[in-house]
Amino acid sequence: MPELDDELESGVDPQTLNVRDRLAAHRENPECAACHVILDPIGLGLETFDAIGRYRTEYAGGDAVDASGTLPGGTEFNGLMELSSLLARDERLLDCVSEKLATYALSRELSESDEPYLDAIRVQWTEDGTTLRSLLEQIVLSEPFRYRRPEVSP
């Protein structure tokens, strides 16, 4: 796989381009396009943050940051605030966040036997106001977390 900053076939040094232009050139490579066509439209909406999370309004070369992005369904947004607002209104968010965080906390894939616990976690989390702190508390207080065992590799 070519790196994002490898010299382009056109001979243009990618460091002279802003991130949006560099990624557009990167997507022209069929090896890269399959993933970047999915990831870039979302990630570009977070361009007001650099690689270590510092806020910026322009790139090092002086170009203004364009933080417009597009979700997979085609919904457009501009920047983190609009993205977070869209996500907050999505009814799938609570299920997705609780499932992913429980999977991470348990260090294993969830199984059918985890569903009743996950349902109870979600109910209590919603009653507590859906804060991240509440979700973490509900997960660590759950039986699957308190009685977890590490997976043993064969």
Image (cartoon, grey):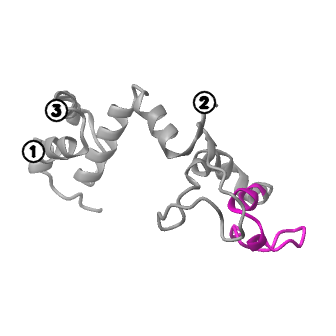
User: What residue is drawn where x is 78% and y is 71%?
Assistant: 16
Q: Which residues are magenta?
A: 1-24
Name the residue beneath numbered marker 2: 73
User: What residue is drawn where x is 64% and y is 31%?
Assistant: 74
Quarter that holds the C terminus: bottom left
Quarter that holds the N terminus: bottom right
Q: Are marks 3 and 2 in contact (CB under 8 Å)?
A: no
Amino acid marked by disc 3: Asp
**Sequence-first tag of 1 and 2:** 2
Query: Around disc 3, counting alpha carbons within 10 Å, would you say few (fewer than 14), some (14 to 19), or many (20 or more)?
Result: few
Q: Are marks 1 and 2 in contact (CB under 8 Å)?
A: no
Element assignment for label 3: loop
Q: Which mark is residue 98?
A: none
Amino acid marked by disc 1: Leu
Examine the rendered structure and indicate whether residue 109 appears above or below residue 58: above
Name the residue beneath numbered marker 1: 141
Q: Magenta segment: does it hold 19?
A: yes
* Nearest the eye: 81 or 26: 81
